[in-house]
Image: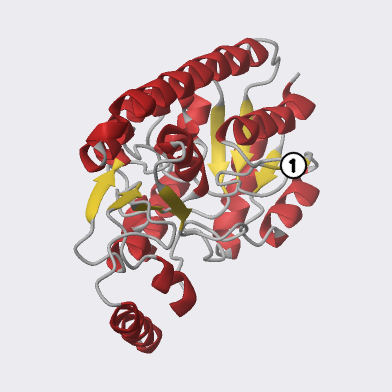
Amino acid sequence: MVRTGLLVAALTLAAASCGNKSDSASGKPRVAVSIFPIYDLTRRIAGDRFDVIVVLPPGKSEHGYEPTPKEIARLEGAKLGIAVGLDLDAWAEKFMGGTKMLRIGEKVKTIPIDLAPIGEDEDDHDHDHDKAGAKEAKEHDHEHEVGAPDPHVWLDPERMAGVVDEIAAQLVALDPAGKDAIGKNAAAVKDSLRKLDAEVAARAKAWTKHTIVTFHGSMTYYARHYGLRIAAVVEPTAGREPTPSYLRDVQAAIKRGGAAALFTEPQLDRAPGELIAKESGIPLGELDPVGGVPGRDSYEALLRWNTDQLDKVLR
């Protein structure tokens, strides 16, 4: 709470020192986007008509992030904020004040978190350890409560193609004179996403194994879209170390479901995943839900990189 108070104070000072400036130093309207994958699509739709910035620094987790005073100051004057919503990136919205917001999670069909963190057999929904895992997650973080919408919508390119027009419409509202250019850019982005989707779907058809374990519950949309089953999630609440009893349940789920591999995430501590993979005798890989680093510096590159990691163990 103390840190949050300091951040708010820093934002107030930044606003006071900068006056009521509504545009960036470049003179272009500023658009602030919470996470890299959505930022990448937005900047391409915007072209050179906007100053588009991303809030979450590379390597940081999208869950529970708190911007630094310097990062908060960059948000001053933004005409539009774009976030996932669904309780994922409230840290970005909190420091944008009265900025108009587009929440992409409200613009797509979402998947409810309808399974316990330990995956259930398709024909059995009454495992005691599944219920315990769900209770543990619910008590620790409402984002992961069973029945709540899963916020990781951006990892399905088909859904994101549907969001492109929503982003373009908000940009045109800020810059009506740029309607044609923004529309042309949006069409190119949608075409790229459709080609990406077809490419990943074709690669997924070659997979002979279809069950994995993920470190956090970020890959549900990707998994559903491309025919994967997630047998278990190591950390139901991102950044909160699972209990020993829960880890034993994950190991049991791996054995029961015949998981091909366990995947950690670069933004989170991989130690629990390393331990489980070693004791379960399955390969350990890595999947990145956010990207924004070399080799994963576009939306398409991020999904292709993740598909490459899955190829290594599922083909």
In the depicted structure, whether residue 34 falls above or below residue 20:
above
Camera-side residue of 240 and 86: 86
Q: State how the image is colored.
A: secondary structure
Q: Quadrant of the N terminus?
A: bottom left
Count residues near mark 1 (Cα–Cα under 10 Å), then give few for <14, some for 14-19, many for 20+.
many
Quarter assignment of residue 302: top right
Camera-side residue of 234 and 175: 175
Q: Who's the residue at 31% across and 32% down the image? A: 178
Q: Who's the residue at 35% across and 46% down the image? A: 84
* Picture coordinates of residue 149, whole percent (x, y): 30, 41
* Picture coordinates of residue 33, whole percent (x, y): 40, 51
Q: How many marks?
A: 1
* Picture coordinates of residue 8, whole percent (x, y): 31, 81
**Is residue 243 visible in the rendered structure shown here?**
yes
In the depicted structure, whether residue 65 falls above or below residue 201:
below
* Left-right relation of 254 to 185: right
Camera-side residue of 192 and 259: 192
Q: Who's the residue at 32% across and 86% down the image? A: 9
In the depicted structure, whether residue 186 falls above or below residue 20:
above
**Residue to which mark 1 is pinned:** 285
In the depicted structure, whether residue 284 falls above or below residue 179:
below
**Is residue 109 visible in the rendered structure shown here?**
no
Q: Who's the residue at 67% across and 36% down the image? A: 255
Q: Quadrant of the C terminus?
A: top right
* Picture coordinates of residue 214, whole percent (x, y): 59, 42
* Left-right relation of 231 to 110: right
* Left-right relation of 307 to 241: right
Of the residues shown, which amino acid type is indicated by label 1? Answer: Gly
